Image (tube, grey):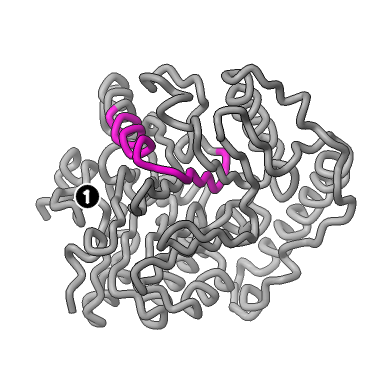
Amino acid sequence: MKTMGLLEDIGVELLWFDSLGAKSSSIYIGSKDGGVIIDPGAAAMQPSYPLPIDEKRKLRREAIKRIEESCWRSRIVIITHYHYDHHVLPNDRDLNNPYKTYLGGKIIILKNPNMYINASQWNRARLFLDKLLSLVGDSLREHLVEPLIKGFEDPLEKLVYIHRRDYGDYTSRRMELLERGKKWFLKLAKKLWSTHKWISDDIGLKDNTRILFGDNKTINYKNIHIHIFEPWFHGVEYDRTGWVTPVLINKENYRIFYTSDLMGPVIEDYAYRIADLRPDILIVDGLPTYLFPYMFNRVNLKRAVDNMIYLIENSNARLIIYDHHLLRDRLWRKRVDEVFLTAKRYGIKVLTAAEYLGDIPLIDKLTGEGDQ
């Protein structure tokens, strides 16, 4: 069963991922008359990453340059959430001609900035759009409206399988955290989403740029069929980092699922839903093992590993790109060794972006882990 070269056969390019040395999860899907780029952003690695800060910044610039070149070829730009490893500001100093080459004249499909978004990303979304609009003589103030919705469904209520897992001694602590999370969600809904001005959807600019919100929408472009999902938690239930919008791409009779930042995925319902979609290719952001055990505990680590095993066994994927957060930790492979053992048993290729591109992950080169 052919897997190497599979992405090239259907016009999918892995632009930059953490295994290459900068925080990113950016892909390009080619088509005639311009393709689609998803999450065109990159950030320098965290302080604990074993590189001098100048080298981290250099790699970030290399990532941005590669992403910018693909933006030239793109007609559609999709941003699944507002973390800076998934988008950059329109006036970013690492871009040569940020508006014209990066965003100008394109269809920009954004995570809805008005709901199912935490306070930090609410502000980042408005900063992004304010700078973008100002570059063409427009103003964000001209596109603000009163909130269109006052009541918001708790996304935890849609989740079923998370409640069927045995959490053992962690159960009481977990229930406490869920109660806190619900209060956080209700506060966002009441004091932010339903009271502050919204940004209007479908903004057209004079240079043919069009700005749309993508949550739970389907877009057909040339021979590419794109479904952007409703907001999913960025990590565990009520994760304070907010929500993301995963993407399913259909092209050349192949189904490609891009998780955005599900961090594992750590939530069982998401893994089961992805498997039910029967993707041929999975592009999965790994769990942030570099935060273990202080901000990502053993129970959630085990959940994320179990969910990846479930995807290998049940999704029908021929190729899995397993990267992003995971490749910030020198012990990443040991943390998830069960995933690779399962993949080997089933004959499924589970690779980092660097490995797919014929290289060794940078973190392995720096620490010597790749030699073992």
Residue 22 % position (x, y): 33, 36
Going by the image, does 78 lie left or right of 233? Answer: left
Residue 332 % position (x, y): 31, 53
The residue sitting at 33% across, 45% down in the picture is 17
In this view, the residue farthest toward the left is 371
Going by the image, does 219 lie left or right of 363? Answer: right
Q: Quadrant of residue 341?
A: bottom left
The residue sitting at 77% across, 26% down in the picture is 142
The residue sitting at 27% across, 24% down in the picture is 58
Per the rendered image, the range of residues in magenta is 62-82
Q: Quadrant of residue 352?
A: bottom left
Q: Quadrant of residue 52?
A: top left
176 or 323: nearer the viewer:
323
Q: How many marks?
A: 1
Residue 124 % position (x, y): 62, 31
The residue sitting at 67% across, 30% down in the picture is 126
| Residue 325 in the image: above or below residue 266 | above
301 or 237: nearer the viewer:
237
Mark 1 neighbour density, 10 Å: few (under 14) some (14–19) many (20 or more)? many
Classify the position of the N terminus by image quarter.
bottom left
Magenta stretch encompasses residue 54 = no
**Would residue 300 be seen by someone viewing this image from the given angle?**
no
Residue 360 % position (x, y): 16, 49
Magenta stretch encompasses residue 79 = yes
| Residue 191 in the image: above or below residue 235 | above
**Would residue 326 be seen by someone viewing this image from the given angle?**
yes
Going by the image, does 193 lie left or right of 138? Answer: right
The kind of residue on which mark 1 rests is Ala
Classify the position of the C terminus by image quarter.
bottom left
> Which residue is under mark 1?
354
